[in-house]
Image (cartoon, rainbow, N blue to C red):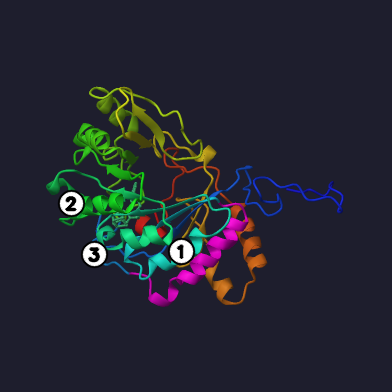
């Protein structure tokens, strides 16, 4: 974007505190304001839709961005207009000294929303320290309320640990809590109403996520996928819903509240059957410092290598802006042009 018509003695125009020439704007005029950073590719679960059970090759430690490097990239991105930060992984709570990163980024002027996505098992140990460091909220992944189904999906018998983690997050004030649930047909799709009841009883937002083709094996397919509208219909047979009045237009989730005014809400992330690419304002950073402009990108933009070779902050901002111009218009899951990325969700950072 050019503001060359502005005489030099006048202040440059700004929008939301960021000068147009600094902002991250893609080739389709979408303004990028949301960054997801992965702090590790490691995980203590083996969710069947996310990570391979065998032959996992973790990134060597030296290839991981340090917490200081992640904080620096975040600071530069926030300077370019990023307002929303999600910390993820792998399992982000396995990253040593994570509260130090949270403390650094929480104080960045311009950052309006700071949250973390976790499987919850380490929350009893870390929720207090994360809250004290400035974390605002957590999204906890929980695919089943039944111990046996949970173990089948996570390949770990850990439902009680995750529920304890949710309690710990609530006690520490990491609220409102969102619960993420990936639904697979024939496995946990019978739990839609049970999850709605859980949302109402606890005052949580439960978000059903459509299964996306980012797993290691060949499990994904239209037989395994449960469309969000089907789950909503099942919930509405028992608990009528109405659209949430405060829907964020850039959020991947379409949110609903209970028509009877009960607490809690339901979200539907229908990435496959109702893609939200047109309003996507998100970029991602992998744990080894590669920028991805889409979850399904086939190319990555290395930031860490050039940073270690001496890039200045201004040059780093230039790289961010250049990478963002290549952001894909949309994913191609349903139009036959789809090519599965090499890295799985756990390696990209979900
Ligand atoms: N380990 C943390 C967790 O599970 O919340 C953070 C990383 S995980 C990759 C982030 C989110 O991606 C989780 O909610 C997970 O359920 C979701 N996810 C992983 N693989 C997926 C897939 N193939 N389709 C849809 N969602 C997926
Ligand atoms: Fe681990 Fe999260 Fe992937 Fe499950 S979804 S394997 S908890 S990274």
Task: Write down the residue under mark 3.
Answer: 54
Q: Relative to residue 160, is residue 314 depicted above or below?
A: below
Please say if the residues under marks 1 and 2 sit with CB atoms less than 8 Å apart: no
Task: Identify the residue at horizontal 50%, vertical 61% (top origin).
Answer: 105
Which tag, 1 or 3, sits closer to the chain's start?
3
Q: For marks 1 and 3, give the one nearer the viewer.
A: 1
Q: Identify residue for label 2.
A: 159
Of residue 157 and residue 291, the one placed in the foreground of this image is 157
Whichever of callouts 3 and 2 sits on the residue coming sooner in the sequence is: 3
**Which one is nearer the viewer's eye here, 249 or 274?**
249
From the top left corner, tell me how far across and down residue 10 is, in percent.
84, 50
Which quadrant contains ligand 2?
bottom left
* Quarter-of-image position of residue 127: bottom left
Q: Does the residue labelled 2 lie within 8 Å of ligand 2?
A: no
Label 2 CA crowd tier, 10 Å (few <14, some 14–19, many 20+): many
The magenta segment is 58-82
Q: Distance between the Cα atoms at labels 1 and 2?
A: 30 Å
Q: Name the residue under label 1.
A: 103
Q: Is residue 240 left or right of residue 146?
A: right
Task: Provide the major secondary structure of the magenta segment.
Answer: helix
Q: Quadrant of residue 231?
A: top left
């Amino acid at each position: 974007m050019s503001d060359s018509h502005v005489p030099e003695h006048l202040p440059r125009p700004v929008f939301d505190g960021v000068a147009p020439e600094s902002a991250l704007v893609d080739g389709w005029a979408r303004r990028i304001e949301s960054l997801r950073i992965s702090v590790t590719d490691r995980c203590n679960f083996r969710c069947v839709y996310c990570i391979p059970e065998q032959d996992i090759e973790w990134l060597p430690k030296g290839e991981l961005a340090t917490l200081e490097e992640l904080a620096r990239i975040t600071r530069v991105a926030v300077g370019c207009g990023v307002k929303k930060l999600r910390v993820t992984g792998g399992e982000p709570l396995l990253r040593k000294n994570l509260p130090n990163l949270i403390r650094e980024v929480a104080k960045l002027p311009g950052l309006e929303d700071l949250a973390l996505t976790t499987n919850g098992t380490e929350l009893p140990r870390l929720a207090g320290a994360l809250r004290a460091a400035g974390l605002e909220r957590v999204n906890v992944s929980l695919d089943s309320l039944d111990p046996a189904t949970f173990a089948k999906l996570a390949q770990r018998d850990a439902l009680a640990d995750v529920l304890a983690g949710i309690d710990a997050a609530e006690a520490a004030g990491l609220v409102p809590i969102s619960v993420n649930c990936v639904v697979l047909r024939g496995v946990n799709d019978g739990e839609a109403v049970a999850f709605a009841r859980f949302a109402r009883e606890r005052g949580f937002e439960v978000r059903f996520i459509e299964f996306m083709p980012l797993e290691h094996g060949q499990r994904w397919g239209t037989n395994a996928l449960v469309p969000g509208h089907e789950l909503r219909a099942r919930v509405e047979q028992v608990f009528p819903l109405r659209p949430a009045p405060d829907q964020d237009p850039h959020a991947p989730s379409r949110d609903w509240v209970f028509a009877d005014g009960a607490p809690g809400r339901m979200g539907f992330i229908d990435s496959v059957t109702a893609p939200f690419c047109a309003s996507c304002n998100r970029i991602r950073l992998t744990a080894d410092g590669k920028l991805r402009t889409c979850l399904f990108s086939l190319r990555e933009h290395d930031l860490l290598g050039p940073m270690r070779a001496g890039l200045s902050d201004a040059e780093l901002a230039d790289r961010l802006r250049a990478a963002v111009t290549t952001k894909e218009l949309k994913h191609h899951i349903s139009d036959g042009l789809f090519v599965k990325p090499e890295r799985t969700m756990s390696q990209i950072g979900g």
